[in-house]
Amino acid sequence: MLAFSVNYPVKVQNGGLFISRGIGTHPTRRLSSHELIYVVRGSLSLQEENTRFDLHTGESLLLFPGREHKGVTTFDPDLKFYWLHFDIVEDIAIIKPQQNSPSLQLNIPQHCKVRDSEPLLTLFRLFLYEQERGGNSLELFLILLLEEVSRAWPENVEPGGPGVALAYKARQLITTQFHLPLGASELAQRLHCNADYLGRVFRLTFQMTLTDALHKQRVAAAEKLLLANTGNVADVARLTGFNDVAYFRRVFRKLLGITPAAYKKLYCREHINSQ
């Protein structure tokens, strides 16, 4: 048996699913906890202190403790939203992680458009199931929910806009043609756009540069080749688009914390000829 304790920096109060009947408004109140709201369909207008928030399908809102919030309009007949009340556990949250120890730093926007609704909806359903059966994993689901919200679209990016579509086309090229000579200029030329603009919209969309995305794709492919024992390090570098072996080693070590040769020695299968 493996037994260990887990301390979460949050404490769940309760959560639920609101389905509108088209009557009434959100109550006026001042909570002592945070409240996370995610609109599944319809629209919801709330005011927190002097700030108004108009939420639509696929958007989330984080309400803060100690601030008065209230409904602005009558509930939309099509409105359906999940809600969740939680507290930040100060004595755990303020503890700084030791140097080099892994930690999860979440930056939660107060109002945002969620990138991918399916994982969020699945987590909310699992949260309510866990709550109904009296399970002890509510805080885990909350952290996963907050992590999904933290991946929201930046305010200056329109999810359905031409810039995002261009960024996704660039990512598709990186995914399929990483082994070819490829960089910001080549990608921009293929997509018939300005390289600076492409780099900017790509970073806003995926929170990484074109070079970082290309390096991650090439190193992931290099891992597979090393595990399959496909040639030496120089061969793997060439097959994954690195013309400079020394540069390949530096990038590989930066991303994985180990050199390609050491990685191959540790993880690849030994092929022994017994005949």
Image (cartoon, rainbow, N blue to C red):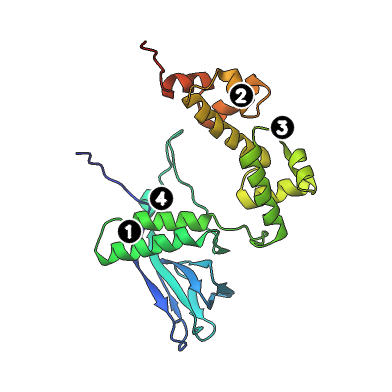
Kindly report the distance in space between the C-alpha atoms of the residues bearing marks 1 and 4: 17 Å
Mark 2 and mark 1 in contact (Cβ < 8 Å)? no
Q: Is residue 237 above or below residue 26?
A: above
Residue 33 figure quarter: bottom left
Label 2 element class: helix
- Give 141 or 176, whichever is nearer the viewer: 176
Kindly report the distance in space between the C-alpha atoms of the residues bearing marks 1 and 2: 45 Å
> What amino acid is at disc 3?
Pro
Mark 3 and mark 1 in contact (Cβ < 8 Å)? no
Residue 103 figure quarter: top left
Q: Which one is closest to the eye, mark 1 or mark 4?
A: 1
Looking at the picture, how far across and down is residue 246, in whole percent?
Answer: 63, 19
Q: Earlier in the sequence, mark 1 or mark 2?
A: 1
Reading the image, the residue beneath label 4 is 93
> What amino acid is at disc 4?
Ala
Reading the image, the residue beneath label 2 is 237
Mark 4 and mark 1 in contact (Cβ < 8 Å)? no
